[in-house]
Image: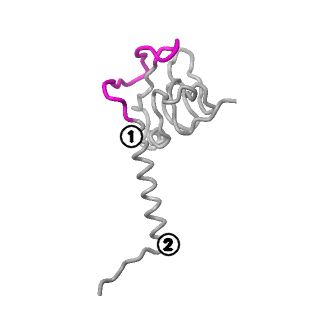
Amino acid sequence: MSEKKLLNRRQFLERAAILGALATGAGSLLAACEPSGESQTTGSTRKGQAQGDAPAVSCDDTSGLNEAQIATRTTNGYVEQTPKPEQRCDNCALYTKPEAGADCGGCTVVAGPINPGGWCRIWAPAA
């Protein structure tokens, strides 16, 4: 006779949590992928013109961050250019303005330099 191996509740929940984490991670990686035809630069340099009058800024230099800090960017789906024009980092409650002379700001949740024209899933309207 063939035996059917049934999962107990604990095994089911463990596997469901792992699959959920994998799905979230895969979605974050896909969201962070850059459209083809655009080159990626590192550092905090200006490149081209963004929508409106503000010049585009690159804030993708994560060389000073550890793996856990970089994971905050990936997990929260941070991207350099917002897919939602009404939701930008510079109008988010979690955004911290750049220091004088700097192009990139910060975030109270996502580690590293943050593009004012960027976006992530935890965007919250500034008061």
SS class, disc 1:
helix
14 relative to 82, above or below: below
Q: Residues within 10 Å of mark 1 (few under 14, many from 20)?
A: few
Query: Which of the marked residues, 1 or 2, is nearer the chain's N terminus?
Result: 2
Residue interval drawn in magenta: 33-56
The front one of 105 and 84 is 84
Give the Cα separation between the discs numbered 1 and 2: 31 Å
Percent coordinates x, y for residue 125 in the rendering: 64, 32
Q: Which mark is residue 122?
A: none
Find disc 2 in the rendering and name its residue: 9
| In the displayed structure image, the side of residue 123 where residue 34 appears, left or right | left
> Where's the C terminus, which quadrant?
top right
* Magenta stretch: dominant secondary structure: loop
115 relative to 17, above or below: above
Percent coordinates x, y for residue 105 in the rendering: 54, 25
Amino acid at dot 1:
Leu
Amino acid at dot 2:
Arg
Find disc 1 in the rendering and name its residue: 30
122 relative to 61, above or below: below
Q: Residue at x 49, y 25 (%)?
A: 115
